[in-house]
Amino acid sequence: MFLKEYFGTIYKASKSLLTGMKLTGYYFFHPKEIQTHEYPDNRGTLKMADRFRGEVIMPHDANNEHRCTGCQACEIACPNGTIKIITKQEIQPDGKKKKRIDTFVYHLELCTMCNLCVVACPSDAIVMGQTFEHSVYDKKQLKKVLNKPGSKLMEGVE
Ligand code: SF4
Ligand code: SF4
C-alpha cells in the first residue's frame, strides 16, 4: 500500500514536470510566439495597446501651435483638481481683447487617467499619451506645464 502510494506520487510529479517542460520546449523552438516581454530590455520596441492611458498631453504642430483656447472645460470636468488653467487677455489685430491660455498646469501625481478631461475638451486640444515611466525622486517634478514655451493657438481654432 505504501509503495503504491510512493510510486504513484513520483509518477504524478514526473508527469507534471514533463507537461511543463513540453511547453518550455515548444517556446524554445517557437520564440516568436512568446507572449512575455523582457522589460526594460525591450524599451526600444515596446508598443503599448492603443487604448493605454499614460498621461494627459497637449499635441503641438511643427509651428509650435496647439488647439487649447483656455476655455477651462477640462479643468471643470476633472474630478480631482489635476488641471489648473491660467489664462491671460491677448490684444487681437482688431484691437479687441481675447482670453487665451497662459499656462496649462497638469498634476500628474493626482491624475487617475479617467479621460474625462479629454472627452470634455471642445477643441480636441488634449489627448492621452502612452508614456508610463513617470518615476521621480521628487513629486514636484510631476507638476507639468502642457503648453510649450512660446506656443500659440492654432489659426482657425476658436
Ligand atoms: S484624466 Fe481624469 S484625473 Fe486626469 S486630468 Fe483628466 S479628468 Fe483629471
Ligand atoms: S484643453 Fe480643451 S477643454 Fe482644456 S482649456 Fe484647453 S480647449 Fe479648453
Image (cartoon, rainbow, N blue to C red):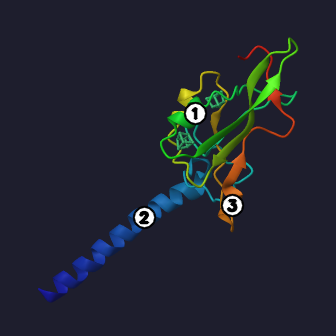
Closer to the camera in the image, 49 or 42:
49
What's the mark number on residue 32? Answer: none
The answer to whether one can see residue 98 in this image is: yes
Q: Quadrant of residue 128?
A: top right
Q: Quadrant of residue 134?
A: bottom right
Closer to the camera in the image, 129 or 23:
129
Q: Which residue is mark 3?
A: 140
For residue 93, above or below residue 32: above
- Residue under the point 68% across and 61% down: 140
- Residue under the point 39% across and 70% down: 17
Q: Residues within 10 Å of mark 1 (few under 14, many from 20)?
A: many
| Image x and y of residue 116, in percent | 51, 34
Amino acid on which disc 3 is placed: Lys
Which image quarter has ligand 1?
Answer: top right
CB of residue at label 2: within 8 Å of ligand 1?
no
Tell me which numbered mark, 2 or 3, is placed earlier along the sequence. Answer: 2
Q: Which residue is mark 1?
A: 74
